[in-house]
Each structure stands twice: as C-alpha cells, then as structure tokens.
C-alpha cells in the first residue's frame, strides 16, 4: 500500500481529502468543483438510498422525476427563494444546434440566445409547484407526497469532496396538504425519519432542532434540522425538513376545492439529504489508519482473505471460504472473498483497513487443521481466533456490536465536547476549542450576526429537546427563553 495518511491532529482537512481519494470513494473531475463518485463510494450511497427510500415509502411517499432545467421566471415568483439562491445558480443562456437551413444538405452550426434563460436546478420547489398546480384540484387529490432522487447544481466557490461540491446527488421530498397542521406534522415526521436513519444506520448521534429565521431555507416558515458533531469539533448539518406554509402555493396558484366547496391554498413541505452524508460518515468514525464504516452501510460487511503457499493450499482454503461466504449470505451478511493472486495477504489487510471493512476473516492451512479462523474488527482493531462452528451467528453478533460501539463512541465524543456556558469569555474559549456550545441568546438577528462575526460560530439550531429554562443572553445579557446550540460549522 501507499504511504500512511496524514494524521488527523496534524492537518484534519488534509487527512480528510487524502482518505476520500485513497479509500477509493471519490476524486475531483475535470469540471471545477465537481466530483467523480467511484464504485466503492457509490456503493455506500446506494445503501443509504435503499434504506431511506424504504422509509419514505413506509411513510406514504412515491418517487417521481422533474426537469433539470427551470425557467428563470419561476424563481422570481417567490421572493425569498430567489434571493436565497441567486448567488449559487448556474444559468443557461444560449443553445447551439446543427441545422440544414435550405434543405440542400449543407449543415451549419447555429447559436442563438434562449427566449427565456434556464436555471440548472439548485433545488426543485419552483418547477414542482408549477406542476402541482395541474395535479391538485380537489381535497381528494391531497395529501400529495412526492420524493425525487436527483442531482442538483449550486455554484460553490470553495469545494471539498462530498461536503460541498458544485454538483451533488440528493433526494428532495415535496408535499402538499389540506391543512397547516398536516403540513407541520409531515415536516416533523420527516425530521424523525432522518434522525432515525442517521443514528441507527450511520451510527451518528444528532441534535434535533429548528433553525433561526436567518438560517432557514429560502422560502420556509420553519426549518427543522439535525446537527452532527465531527471529530474536529465542527458541526455538520445532516438533514433538513421545511414547513413552507402557503408561500409556494400562492406563488404558483395551487388551490383545492374543500369538502365544503370552498377554494383554499394548499400547505407545503420540502425536505432533503444529500451525498454530504458520506462526508459526515467519514468524519465521525474514521481514524488515522483510514475509513471506519458502520456495518449497516458498508458495501461489504466481511472480507475473507486466504493465506496460502501454492495452488493446492488455495484450493482447500477457497472451498471452506466459499462455504462460509454462502452461509453468511444466507443470514443477511454481505461478504467479499478476495482470492486475488496479484497481492499478498499483508497488502490486502492494509487495503481493507483503509477501506473500513467492519470485519476481516483470515484463513490459512493451520486454521483448516484447527477448524478456526482469525477475526479482525476494524472499529477497535482487535483480533480473535474463533471456531468455525457457529461462526455465522458469531459474526452477526459481532457486526451488531460494531454498529453499537461506533454509535456509543460517537455519543461519548459528543458528550465530552458539548459545553454549557453562561458568560461571554467562557463562550469564546469553548467555541475556539471546538464542539457544541449551549448558551442563551436574546432572539435577535443582530446579536446572532455579531456573535458570528466575532467568533465564526453560528446558531446550529434551537433544540427541540433538553433545557427549556429561561436565562440571560451570553452576549447582551438580555432575556432569553432557552439555550440554543452554537458551533463553528462546515
């Protein structure tokens, strides 16, 4: 294998970038700020997709697909929405085509300006609500609960693989409801779906909350969010769910006839997570040796590496390895048997350590004689020799333990790096050290901006759970209704 990764404590950003590339997750493309997601990285995204898609359908949503291009005029219909995305949009202004103008077979290139410029979708509220105007006529058409798996483009100036790229993959849900209560329930339900997924499948603890007015999604009346803490002490927004009120319904004239025959505007939500979650996965669990993956999302949960001299030994080991592989797959464990003869076992061990495979099985001639295998856990780097008898259930149990251990380790880190402060000097020191800081805030955008300017910390969320007692703002000393979560963030 290549030289070791940069250590996290030496240069966290460099460590992250090296790990993404060397673990074969992604690489930069020829297009500035865009990435190529490689098969191993995409396999993680596919596992995320599969579980989230199942959860969406269990909560009554259907998948659809909407156009990549959005007429520029659509954005101007919702003022705060266009303002929120104006600086990030990629715009198509011209088209080029080959034409035979006189029908004589003389092909010429034509270039012309579009009658209306098109926005390459940064998010799809506008094109979807223009569509919903045709889909919604009566209360019988509601609720309308649609999800889209798609790519979006936001012209970011400072990019980093997975965390912030000009183009990325995501899902975006868009729902329409007859009442305000139903729409708020939908937004809160999807927040719970995200929190459940991130905690139980990604093994990442999160804080659930709502954004301040200045941090809300452009066009939303309320933005619910989950916030995670990375190993370098910075926060990362892991998912958002928005209560849009009737803003988009009014902008695009989406009305329905109620049971009483009265014409009403519908109530809306939107919600989404993206390939940024892969960045969160890396930065929560991985170490100086490489990637560490929770079993629930690992492309393969177990790898079997044969240790042999000569073809005869390989044949014997392979027969047993394939038997174990088949038995593990029968109980729902994904397994890769690496019988390549182009690399030695030590090289393979290092490769799978770098790629974060949760559990490694090593098998040699002596193991066949003793009816044993060597198991190596990636999460805590421990090894054990186990009998082959009942190995399938033992491995299933180990994978569950690895999943729990990763969550508990991350939760312990969060607990150790979450601080409650009451004065400005302590606040500045804790923010500089990194982590979540729980402090009172007077509720004004002016104070929020001053704190951000002086410390580079933002209010990550107003937590939905926890300390709700009133107090005094850490910056102004004015009255505060509850503590909020501050942190420097990605």
Image: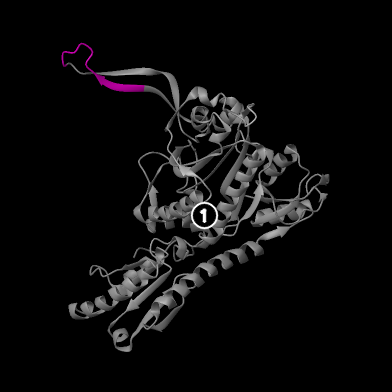
Numbered marks: total:
1
Residue segment shown in magenta:
95-105
The quarter holding residue 168 reads: top left
The answer to whether residue 126 is above or below residue 32 is: above
96 magenta-colored: yes
Residue at the far top in the pictured view: 102
Residue 398, image x and y in percent?
A: 47, 74
In the rendered structure, the answer to whether residue 428 lies left or right of residue 137 reads right
247 magenta-colored: no
Residue 466, image x and y in percent?
A: 72, 57
Q: Nearer the viewer, residue 273 or 339?
A: 273
Read off the residue under disc 1: 280
Q: Nearer the viewer, residue 314 or 174?
A: 174
The quarter holding residue 153 reads: top left
Q: Secondary structure at mark 1?
A: helix
Residue name at image x 42 percent, y 56 percent: 47
In the rendered structure, the answer to whether residue 253 lies left or right of residue 485 reads left
Residue name at image x 54 percent, y 61 percent: 200
The answer to whether residue 101 is above or below residue 243 is: above
Residue name at image x 27 percent, y 84 percent: 365
In the rendered structure, the answer to whether residue 251 lies left or right of residue 340 reads right
Whether residue 293 appears in this view of the structure is no
């Amino acid at each position: 294998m290549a030289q070791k990764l940069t250590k996290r404590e030496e240069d966290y950003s460099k460590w992250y970038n090296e790990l993404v590339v060397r673990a074969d997750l992604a690489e930069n493309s020829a297009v500035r700020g865009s990435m190529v997601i490689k098969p191993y990285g995409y396999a993680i995204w596919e596992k995320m997709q599969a579980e989230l898609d199942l959860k969406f359908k269990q909560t009554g949503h259907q998948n659809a697909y909407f156009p990549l291009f959005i007429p520029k005029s659509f954005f101007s219909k919702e003022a705060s929405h266009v303002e929120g995305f104006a600086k990030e949009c990629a715009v198509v202004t011209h088209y080029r085509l080959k034409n035979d103008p006189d029908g004589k077979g003389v092909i010429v290139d034509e270039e012309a300006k579009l009658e209306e410029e098109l926005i390459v979708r940064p998010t799809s509220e506008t094109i979807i609500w223009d569509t919903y105007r045709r889909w919604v006529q009566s209360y019988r058409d509601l609720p309308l609960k649609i999800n889209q798996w798609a790519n979006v483009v936001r012209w970011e100036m400072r990019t980093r693989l997975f965390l912030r790229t000009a183009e990325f993959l995501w899902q975006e849900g868009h729902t329409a409801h007859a009442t305000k209560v139903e729409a708020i329930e939908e937004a809160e339900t999807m927040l719970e779906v995200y929190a459940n997924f991130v905690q139980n499948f990604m093994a990442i603890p999160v804080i659930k909350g709502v954004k301040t007015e200045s941090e809300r999604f452009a066009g939303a009346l309320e933005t619910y969010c989950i916030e995670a803490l990375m190993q370098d002490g910075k926060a990362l927004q892991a998912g958002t769910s928005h209560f849009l009120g009737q803003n988009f319904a009014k902008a695009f004239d989406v009305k329905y006839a109620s049971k009483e025959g009265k014409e009403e505007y519908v109530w809306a939500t939107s919600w989404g997570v993206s390939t940024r979650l892969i960045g969160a996965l890396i930065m929560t669990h991985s170490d100086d040796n490489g990637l560490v993956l929770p079993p629930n999302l690992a492309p393969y949960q177990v790898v079997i590496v044969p240790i042999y001299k000569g073809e005869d030994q390989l044949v014997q080991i392979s027969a047993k390895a394939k038997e174990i592989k088949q038995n593990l797959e029968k109980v729902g464990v994904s397994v890769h048997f690496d019988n390549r003869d182009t690399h030695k076992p030590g090289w393979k061990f290092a490769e799978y350590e770098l790629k974060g495979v949760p559990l490694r099985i090593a098998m040699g001639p002596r193991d066949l004689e003793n009816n044993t295998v060597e198991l190596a856990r990636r999460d805590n780097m421990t090894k054990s020799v186990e009998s082959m008898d009942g190995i399938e259930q033992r491995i299933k149990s180990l994978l569950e333990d690895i999943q729990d251990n990763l969550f508990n380790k991350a939760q312990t880190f969060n607990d150790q790096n979450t601080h409650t402060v009451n004065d400005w000097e302590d606040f500045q020191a804790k923010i500089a050290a990194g982590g979540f800081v729980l402090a009172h805030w007077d509720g004004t955008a002016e104070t929020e901006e001053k704190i951000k300017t002086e410390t580079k910390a933002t209010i990550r969320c107003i937590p939905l759970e926890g300390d709700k007692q009133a107090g005094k703002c850490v910056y102004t000393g004015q009255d505060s209704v509850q503590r909020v979560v501050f942190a420097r963030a990605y």
